[in-house]
Image: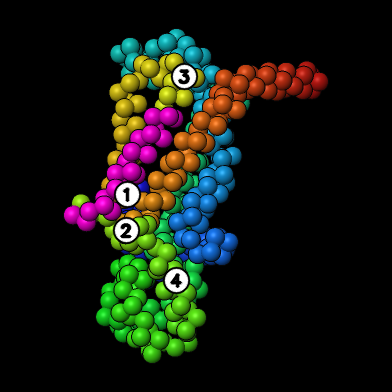
Amino acid sequence: MYIDFITMAAKGVNNGMALFKPLYWLFGKCMEGLLIVFDNKYFLALIVFTILTRLVLFPFNLKQQKTMAKTNRIQPKIQKIQKKYNVNAITDPKQRQKANQAMQEEMQALYAREGHNPMNMGCGPMAFQMIFLMGIIGIIYYPIQYILGVDIASNADAIAKALSIDGRYFQIEILQNFAQYKDTLATEFPKLFTADKIAAIENYKQHMYIGSIDMTQIPHWKDGIIVLIPILCLVTSIGSTIVSTLIQKKNNPAMGQQQGQMIMMMLMMPLFSFYIAFQVSAAVGFYWIISNLVAIVQQLVMAKFFPPRRNIARQMVENTIERRSREESIKNVK
């Protein structure tokens, strides 16, 4: 699902998926401001942008950690209830259904007492990260429209026809071959591609290199050093996953009993990012590398200053206060 979602966004026609255009515009304005601050140093601006987006996501990550802490705290009680009814050991269908219903009712009562919603398992941060990735893809693949402010959207078909190019990676193709296209664009669309806009696009293009690597290109095994981008995506993603897993195991020793599932989870996202890094331009992979490195630092900071055990203790105190408050309310009503 995520793979189709990202590649569909990356391979959108002309100006991207309509659903994400407001996000493209917002991120484009942010990058435009950062480019001004950092004198058009694109990748420095992208690093700062990545750090800022991670800071925005920090409260959601913290909430996710608190949710997991609460889940870990009541897990022994859940297991006790499951052992009490032992539904899987009942062979009679009617008796099994009756026992399962009683078990669910007791679990619901437990959730109510503990103030825990089992449906809220902290998927918000992942969803926000995917949305942010869509925004990043937008400003990398459609920079002429959303960062440099040239309204290509209203003349996309005419521009594509004049340059004899198709709609896939439309603006990236213009950027990659701008020296070849700029005279045609200036002649055919003088109101869009003014001298100032052409100079801005040329300056932007010059800063899309890291050394000799053109970061607008899509990495391929045969293209030499650019293949380091997907490899570093894989390595940093594995590093982020390992750090996260070790922190979780330290605070929840029961995870050691689920080694197989943990290994699968540890490999899934890194392999996913490795695959996607070969489907999108190297600049997207660069963002992912920086995002993974920032995530590692963020996880270590959270483990140091917001440890789950402290969250569990705080949750216990809060739940006790809330439960006593409800009991007092019931007494006053009676």
Report the residue marked by disc 3. Answer: 250
Residue under label 4, please give it: 203
In the image, which residues are magenta?
222-244
| Inter-mark Cα distance, 4 to 1 | 23 Å
Do we see residue 218 in this rendering?
A: yes
**Mark in front: 3 vs 4:** 4
In this view, the residue farthest toward the top is: 84
Query: Pointer 2: what residue?
Result: 213
Secondary structure of residue under mark 4:
helix
Amino acid beneath label 2: Ile
Secondary structure that dominates the magenta span: helix
Pointer 2 with pointer 4, Cβ within 8 A: no
- Name the one closer to the observer, 93 or 201: 201
Q: Position of residue 238 (x, y in %)?
A: 35, 35
* Residue at 47% in and 39% down: 295
Q: Residue furthest front?
A: 211
Image point (52%, 53%), residue name: 49
Q: Nearer the viewer, mark 4 or mark 1?
A: 4
User: From this viewpoint, is residue 117 visible?
Assistant: no
